[in-house]
Amino acid sequence: MASYTVQAQQDSTEKTTLTLAALYSSNVSYYGQATNEKLPYILINATVRFPIGLYFSAGSYKLLNYGGGLSETDLGAGFDYDFNDQFSTGIAYTRSFFPSNSPLLQASNENNLNFSAKYSWPWLKSSFSADYAFGQQNDIFLSLTHSKEISIGSLFNEKNALSVEPAIELVAGTRHFYETYTTKKNNRDKANGKGKAPVSAGNSNSTITTTVASDSFNLLSYNFKLPLSLSRANYIAEVSYQLSVLGPKAEAELKHQQSFFGLAFYYQF
């Protein structure tokens, strides 16, 4: 559940806009990585964007099969700048709030600083993203995405445009967050009676072994995305599919190949 850029079909450069978004996903994806435990969720988000490129956002996540309250709350701010019709950049900061013993991979990194750059070629669109995630741990993620928007035509009437935008994304980064995740998972398992017994009876000095994250910078995942969108002047409805394949040095706890299905609706005032 990285940062979402929520926008309607046409960004306004002359007025302040409010975009409301509601999303469902069949599982949590953290830069294409997912645990063996399936965690479907819903997200509600609101973004206020000003003509100068400044915007503020707030969102809440709810895992559908874990806990009774909110699973994550995000507050963010950012600034986008368009150099011309082809090239744009942006910078954003997001502060996240998690409950104790959260099952989410990203729960140890409560802060995220993002820089992005996009360039539209005549035949495809390329985007680069750099994230510095910090909090209990510190991680760096780099993402490179190539996509192509293909117009299918209209649905029902000429005001409703139907399009598909296949994309391929490569993500590289560090894995310090995984050390905190495994520690919290062991604590949850122990509280639920799933912890391992001591090696010998009466030994009070038994230890719990956890997997420690790698300090090296490696390829994390290959992500193939296929969103189908129905859009009008002020809304977008989307059905999406994503296939993620992890890099060769992924941890055993993470599912090495995963499919994600999503539904989303954006409305801009």
Image (tube, rainbow, N blue to C red):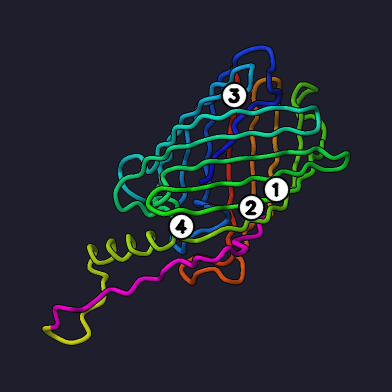
The picture places residue 246, in percent across and down from the top left corner, at: 60, 64
Secondary-structure class at tag 3: strand
Q: Which residue is mark 4?
A: 38
CA gap, disc 2 and disc 4: 15 Å
Sequence-first disc among 3 and 1 = 1
Q: Is residue 95 left or right of residue 90?
A: left
Residue bearing the label numbered 1 = 226
- Label 4's element? loop
Q: Which mark is residue 258?
A: none
Residue stretch in magenta:
203-223
**Which comes before the other along the chain, label 3 or label 4?**
4
Lower position in the chain sequence, tag 1 or tag 2: 1
Mark 4: which amino acid? Lys
Q: Tag 2, which secondary structure? A: strand
**Residue at x 82% of width, y 43% of height:** 124
Name the amino acid, label 2.
Gln
